[in-house]
Structure formats: C-alpha cells, structure tokens
C-alpha cells in the first residue's frame, strides 16, 4: 500500500493572519508547525507581522508602495499542493504451475527446526507425517500473496488443466485456452480459490509445460501497459506432451524441445522467465515406457531453460532447485524481491517550497516500520546507506536504498509525508 499525506490548508495566509508576530505557534528559526493533516509546515524566517492584506491607499501590504519593495516576503500557499497518489512500478507476473500427477507424490518432513526441514526430504524421520509436493507449493504461493499482492500484479496458469486425466493419451495433456486467473491487482485470493486445494490428491496428467508457458506469454503480451513483465515457471519434471507428437510414444517418452524456443522468444520480447525446479536430481532418465521423457537429464534441461529465459543464476546451477519447502519459499521470495522495483514515482514533481519530511516504509505492525525523518534527508550513497534519494533534479521520483528497499520489497508498504516552507 502506498500513501502520500497532503496539505489540506485552504490558504496559509489565513494561518499567518491568525498568528500575528509569529506568537508561540512557530518561530523564525525554522521550527515545524503541524497542519491539521499531520503535515509539518516549517518556517524559514518569514515576517509574520502582516496580515497580507493590501493597503487601500497604496496598493501594497501594510502601506508599502506598489512600486517598491514589500515589507513581507512572498508567501507560499501550502494549501495549493494536493499530492497525487504514489505511482510505483507494478510488475506483471504470470505464475505457471506444474499440476502433473507427480505433484501429489508424498515425502516425509523433518521435525520443525531441523536442517533440511521440508516436504520431500530424503532423510526424514520415519515417524513424521507425509505431505505432497503440491501441498507445500500451495502454502508457499499463498505466503507470497500476503506481502506482495499489493506491489505485484499476479496471474496464474496451470499445466495440465484441472480436467486432465491420468491416461496414456492426449487427455493427459489438456491445457486451458485461457489463464486460470488473468493478471490483475490483488488477485492472490482469486488464484488460491482457482487452483486445486492444498490437500488435493486427485492431480493428474503429463507435463505440457510448453502449452502452459505459451498461455502465460500470450496473456502478458496482451496487456496494454509499459510495466515490466515476467513469468515464474515451477515444475518437478521434464516437459513432454509436445503438441506436434505423432503418437503417444512421442507425446510422453520424448522431451519437448519446443519449450526452450518459446522461453527464448519471450525473453527476446522483454519477458524473462524464472525457473524453479522441485527436487531435481542431476541424473539421466532410463529408456523405459513410463510416461517420462527417455534419456533426459531434467537438471540439464532446466539449466538450459534458465539461460534461455534470461535469468540464469551464477555458478553451475542456473535455475532455482528446491529440495524442500524452505528452499522453495526462499526461491520464490528471492525472485519476487528481484522483480519488485524500489523506484517510487511521486505522481508529479515536489513543488518549489515543499519537501519530503518523512518516508515510512512498512506498516506499524509486524515486521515493523522503518522511518526516515527530516527535511529532504537524502542518503549520500544509495549503494551503501539505508534511506532514500531523488532520482533526478526534477524531484518527481525517489528510490529507496539499502534496508529501506529490502523492507519495501518484503512489505509493499510506503507512506510519504510532505512539509512546506513559509517564506
């Protein structure tokens, strides 16, 4: 949520008339005077002895000549600035989720707090409960909406569709003609309601990742805006169900090499794809009829996919490989934090005589709020300090720095309070 506190004073000259000589309400030293909205109105040494009304005989205030110097400095009308809504950069993100039959494979969890705690840990205590990959994927997707639904517009597509069947034919490869949920504001609850429930054990079908990706890319390409666009692909296996398969053997036992082509084409059009693999081992699959691509190393294929998508990670492992729920959560958070921009357009330049008095990042609830207070107190070095700075002399955009940026990405909350110079 983003807010700007505005100045609702009808005219500052009226306020000055109510405080002849400055009184105790403000001082010539620059003390701040809180307006009724909570805005800090700071004095810069204006002579407040005048009401500002023109003398009927001379035309100047307090009897001064209309052609000579005024005995008072020009007055800024602090009621004239009505800050528009903050206009942050809102990325558009399509989640492309693997709903194949293998996503209901069960795995043991470790006791909470143990290293490797997760839903398919291979060395888990045999006395702990079993949960499915889908159950933990559902929980992680739900968790990212709680903090980021306001700063990212999400949509979602499933592959295969909920109508796919556990069959060795094209019915296992069905994909809907439209996204499960279109990209839009605050769609988290809608996505959670549309995807299968966390405890679902009826997931079925192959891995038509190419069709799912194409669905997501078409949705993003159809959006009529200039906001940045991304795809996040989450899968636990190698793509099959190729659309041009001549028979079921080609459909299920061959890797669909159309997938990296589709992903690379999207990246070339400015739509990168982040790739998350679930428990992907660096092994080559056997040459047997089992519904999975033969002679295929899914680890290598997902590495290639991350490179094609323009999001390759440094090192040997180019994609995000999550072997448990904690790692899956960390991968999604790292991706979404990279996607969220810390540049905050203000809607219009800060006018002359006004300044940013306070930047509040986060809400006044857990995990708390960071407050940067003081008249246009920009950081000296955004790369090494925490706070904020204007991006240019136009004063129409700020960028959050250090801990302020990190906290904004975590909470999606920012509030800006303006002050006004009298003088």
Image (tube, helix red, strand yellow):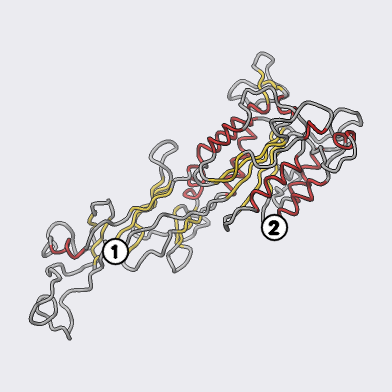
Q: Residue at x 53, y 35 (%)?
A: 189
**How packed is label 1: few (under 14 Cα within 10 Å), some, or many (20 or more)?**
some
Instruction: Please state if 393 lies on the left or on the right of 74 as rendered.
Output: right
Query: What residue appears at the point 26 percent right and 68 percent down from the top-left corner?
Result: 76
Which badge, 2 or 1, comes first in the chain's sequence? 1
Q: CA distance from mark 2 to mark 1?
A: 43 Å
Is 94 drawn above or below residue 113 in the view shown? below
> Local crowd at mark 2 within 10 Å, few (<14), some, or many (≥20)?
few
User: Observer-nearest residue: 174 or 276?
Assistant: 174
Q: Is residue 395 above or below residue 1?
A: below
Residue sticking out furthest to the right: 287
**Residue bearing the label numbered 1:** 80
In this rendering, would 223 be left or right of 23?
right
From the top left corner, tell me how far across and down residue 274 is, in percent.
68, 46
Q: Which mark is residue 269?
A: 2
416 or 85, nearer to the observer = 85
Q: Position of residue 396 (x, y in %)?
A: 44, 63
Label disc, if present, on residue 135 of the rendered structure: none
The quarter of the displayed image where residue 195 is located: top right
Q: Are marks 2 and 1 in contact (CB under 8 Å)?
A: no
Considering the image in quadrants, where does the C terminus appear?
bottom left
Q: What percent of the width, then of the height, locates residue 41?
A: 26, 59
Q: Is residue 317 left or right of residue 16?
A: right
Relative to residue 343, is residue 156 depicted above or below? Answer: above
Q: Regarding mark 2 in the picture, which secondary structure is present there?
A: loop
Name the residue furthest left: 57
Q: Number of labelled discs?
A: 2
Residue farthest top in this picture = 127
């Amino acid at each position: 949520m983003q807010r700007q506190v505005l100045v609702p004073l009808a005219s500052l000259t009226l306020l000055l008339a109510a405080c002849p000589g400055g009184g105790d309400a403000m001082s010539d030293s620059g003390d701040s005077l809180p307006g009724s909205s909570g805005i800090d109105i700071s004095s810069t040494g204006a002579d407040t002895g005048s009401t500002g009304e023109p003398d009927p005989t001379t035309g100047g205030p307090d009897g001064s000549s209309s052609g000579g110097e005024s005995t008072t400095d020009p007055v800024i009308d602090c009621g004239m600035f009505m800050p528009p809504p903050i206009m942050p950069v809102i990325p558009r993100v399509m989640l492309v989720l693997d709903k194949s039959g293998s996503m209901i494979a069960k795995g043991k969890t470790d006791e909470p707090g143990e290293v490797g705690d997760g839903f398919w840990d291979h060395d888990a205590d045999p006395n702990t409960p079993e949960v499915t990959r889908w159950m933990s994927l559902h929980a992680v997707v739900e968790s990212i909406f709680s903090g980021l639904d306001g700063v990212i517009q999400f949509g979602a597509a499933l592959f295969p569709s909920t109508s796919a069947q556990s069959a060795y034919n094209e019915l296992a490869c069905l994909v809907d003609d439209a996204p499960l949920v279109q990209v839009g504001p605050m769609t988290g609850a809608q996505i959670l309601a549309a995807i299968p429930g966390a405890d679902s054990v009826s997931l079925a079908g192959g891995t038509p990742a190419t069709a799912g990706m194409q669905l997501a890319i078409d949705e993003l390409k159809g959006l009529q805006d200039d906001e940045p666009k991304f795809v996040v692909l989450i899968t636990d296996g190698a793509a099959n169900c190729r659309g041009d398969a001549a028979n079921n053997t080609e459909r299920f036992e061959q890797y669909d090499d159309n997938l990296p082509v589709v992903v690379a084409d999207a990246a070339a059009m400015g739509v990168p794809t982040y790739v998350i693999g679930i428990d992907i081992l660096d092994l080559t699959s056997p040459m047997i009829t089992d519904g999975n691509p033969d002679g295929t190393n899914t680890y290598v294929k997902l590495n290639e996919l991350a490179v094609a998508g323009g999001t390759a990670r440094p090192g040997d492992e180019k994609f995000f490989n999550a072997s448990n729920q904690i790692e899956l959560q960390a991968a999604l958070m790292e991706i979404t934090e990279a996607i969220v921009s810390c540049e905050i357009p203000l809607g219009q330049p800060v006018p002359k005589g006004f300044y940013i008095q306070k930047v509040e990042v986060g809400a006044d609830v857990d995990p708390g709020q960071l407050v940067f207070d003081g008249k246009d107190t920009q950081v000296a070095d955004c790369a090494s300090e925490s706070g904020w700075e204007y991006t240019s002399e136009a004063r129409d955009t700020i960028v959050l720095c250090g801990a302020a940026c990190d906290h904004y990405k975590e909470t999606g909350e920012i509030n800006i309070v303006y002050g006004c110079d009298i003088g």
